[in-house]
Amino acid sequence: MFHKILNYVKCEKLDVRLKKDHIYIENYKQILIMEENNITIDCKDFILKIKGKNLIISRLENQAVSIKGEIISLEVK
């Protein structure tokens, strides 16, 4: 059982949760671009480009970020 808990805690899979006015991303590599209408994030296996209006980073923790604003589109490269 301890092994299962340890694997859960050490899990580094990308987690992206999209809601109407914000997006939450966990286990990303780094924020590449941070502008009012564009935030680009390196998600290890791909680049995620978030386009919107009045985008702000409302919460920033160790490998977790929450972005608020009017999200218009998401682009995966």
Image (cartoon, rainbow, N blue to C red):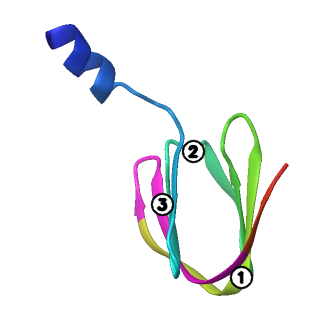
Q: What's the magenta region?
A: 60-72
**Residue 34: percent from left, percent from top:** 69, 71
Residue bearing mark 1: 52
Residue 50 visible: yes
**Residue 4: percent from left, percent from top:** 24, 15
In what element is the residue under mark 3? strand
- Callout 2 amino acid: Tyr
- Residue 65 bears which disc, if any? 3
Q: Give the residue at the far front of this rendering.
A: 20
Going 35% across and 24% down the picture, which residue do you hit? 10
In what element is the residue under mark 1? strand
Look at the numbered discs 1 and 3 and tell me whether their residues touch, using CB distance below 8 Å.
no
* 61 vs 5: above or below: below
Q: Which of pointers 2 and 1 indicates the residue nearer the eye?
A: 1
Q: Is residue 19 left or right of residue 43?
A: left
Going 15% across and 11% down the picture, which residue do you hit? 2
**Alpha carbons under labels 2 and 3: distance apart:** 9 Å
Quadrant of res 35: bottom right
Q: Is residue 73 left or right of residue 62?
A: right
The main secondary structure of the magenta stretch is strand
**Residue 23: percent from left, percent from top:** 53, 67
Q: Which of pointers 1 and 3 indicates the residue nearer the eye?
A: 1
In what element is the residue under mark 2? loop
- Residue 28 bears which disc, if any? 2
